[in-house]
Amino acid sequence: MAGRAPSALSSAASSSAGATAPRGVTGSSLPSRGGVRLRTLVLIRWAAVAGQLFTVAVVYWGLGFALPVLAIGGTIALSALLNLTVSIGRPASARIDDREATIFLAFDIIQLAVLLYLTGGLINPFSLLLLAPVAIGATILSLGGNIALSLLTIVSIALLGLFHQPLPWRGPPPALPDIYQAGAWAGLTLTTLLVTLYGWRLAEEGRQMADALAAAQAALAREQRMSALGALAAAAAHELGTPLSTIAVVTKEMLREVETDDPLREDVELLSAESERCRSILARLSVDPAGDVSDAYTLVPLPALIEAAAQAYNRDGIAIAFEAGPVGEGVPATAPIQVRSPEIMQGIGNIVQNAVSFARQEVLIVTRWTAAWSEVEVTDDGPGFSQALLDELGTPFISTRQGEEGHMGLGVFIAKTLLERTGATVTFGNRSGTTRGAMVAVRWPNPVFKAT
């Protein structure tokens, strides 16, 4: 079966990009992520400087071990001096980009490597501190920055294993077997790689989820703005009805008073016709639930709500068919009602948009209900979902078309997130039998049946 993935981006991001499509974009992307705050890294380095000074003091004066105090003190002072330099003239809330953060942490690795070179190399129990900058970088840097820090750390570990000053000790330092020193080198190297890989991957997934949720929130905000606009239009229609009725009455009175051959009669007739036209437009705006989201239509039959959500995605060559009806015996023949919420309009719209974009000829939307649940099933005659993607559908940035025409793999994630906020369960699959195509089912428990 051919591969098939969700439609790329929800419409919310499109509105900010000025796209004309109602719920999709073709050339926008999420805003770039901001860098880490300089103050955060500065505070971490001050903590490291304080810890290094305390350790040197304990080892030199407390334990009485001989240390190259001037060299070690100069190395620590250089770190403190650099901290002061980068802090001067920049506000505490300043953010630094990925490149600057990489250089910042790279200096910390080099400074730690120098301190370890002066105090025994990998035999020094504090050699594990080389992993600290790597762990910090894994959470804030890009993949390229993490690779650079990891390589620098691995090279530093290798050099420290070969070249270092004797370990500070009373009398001759302990002679550890070469195989133990090789094991320490291998352990630090592998730990560096694992910390970088796992830390960056977890942090990247968190950043992707934050981006995807921001896009979902933008989609909901756009739908809410559209709802507010519709409510405003309905309110305007209601308020304008009275003055238009007055104009119509006055116009009729004028028509009775003006003679047939009067030059003003044509103007009065035009005024009467235009006032009637305005009244019909306002009446249509007030009674069309598909185009009006005023309070009078907050609760609408589920099939009508689904048709309203799908109507914006008609495309030449693709027929959208609707079916609706109860399932089983003893079920009310009238459809259940549902809140006309922005989440449902946006979520169903994204699913229909995705189906239309992959369908060959037809998209079928079936609304069914029982006394226990109501369900909307959207199917198409396209290639269907690939088995490799079925388990991943509903997670952000999953799309076989990612990167093509602005597709980012957020459409189905946004739809699933918004619909689940309404209490629905969303499932994905493929049509059974010989007919190929994808199937998305949205089910709400405990339907409400009420005359509307």
Image (cartoon, rainbow, N blue to C red):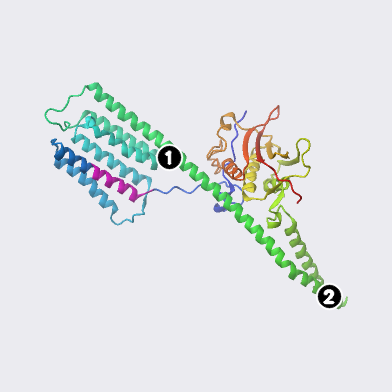
Q: Quadrant of residue 324?
A: top right
Q: Residue at x 71, y 64 (%)?
A: 238
> Magenta span has 78?
no
Disc 1 crowd rating (10 Å Cα; few below 14, some 14-19, many 20+) is: some
Residue 303 versus residue 252 in the image, above or below: above
Contact between labelled residues 1 and 2, with CB atoms less than 8 Å apart: no
- For residue 442, the mark is none
Q: Name the spot of residue 367 as percent of width and height, x first.
A: 72, 40
Q: Label 1: state its secondary structure.
A: helix
N-term-proximal mark, 2 vs 1: 1
Question: Which amino acid type is marked by label 2?
Answer: Glu
In three-dimensional space, the C-alpha distance between marks 2 and 1, rounded to whole angstroms, equals: 75 Å
Spot the residue most to the left. 171
Q: Quadrant of residue 333?
A: top right
Q: Name the spot of residue 9 as percent of width and height, x first.
A: 56, 44
Disc 2 crowd rating (10 Å Cα; few below 14, some 14-19, many 20+) is: few
Q: Main secondary structure of the magenta part?
A: helix
Indicate left or right for 253 with 179 as reference.
right
- Is residue 287 something one can see in this rendering? yes
> Magenta span has 49?
yes
Q: Name the spot of residue 444 as percent of width and height, x first.
A: 66, 41
Q: Residue at x 55, y 52 (%)?
A: 17
Q: Toward the viewer: 241 or 404?
A: 241
Q: Which residue is mark 1?
A: 203
Q: Name the spot of residue 431 as percent of width and height, x first.
A: 68, 31
Q: How many marks?
A: 2
Question: Which amino acid type is marked by label 1?
Answer: Ala
Q: Toward the viewer: 147 or 234?
A: 234
Please report the bounds of the magenta region as a residue range: 36-51
**Quadrant of the rendering where the N terminus is positioned:** top right
Q: Which residue is mark 2?
A: 253
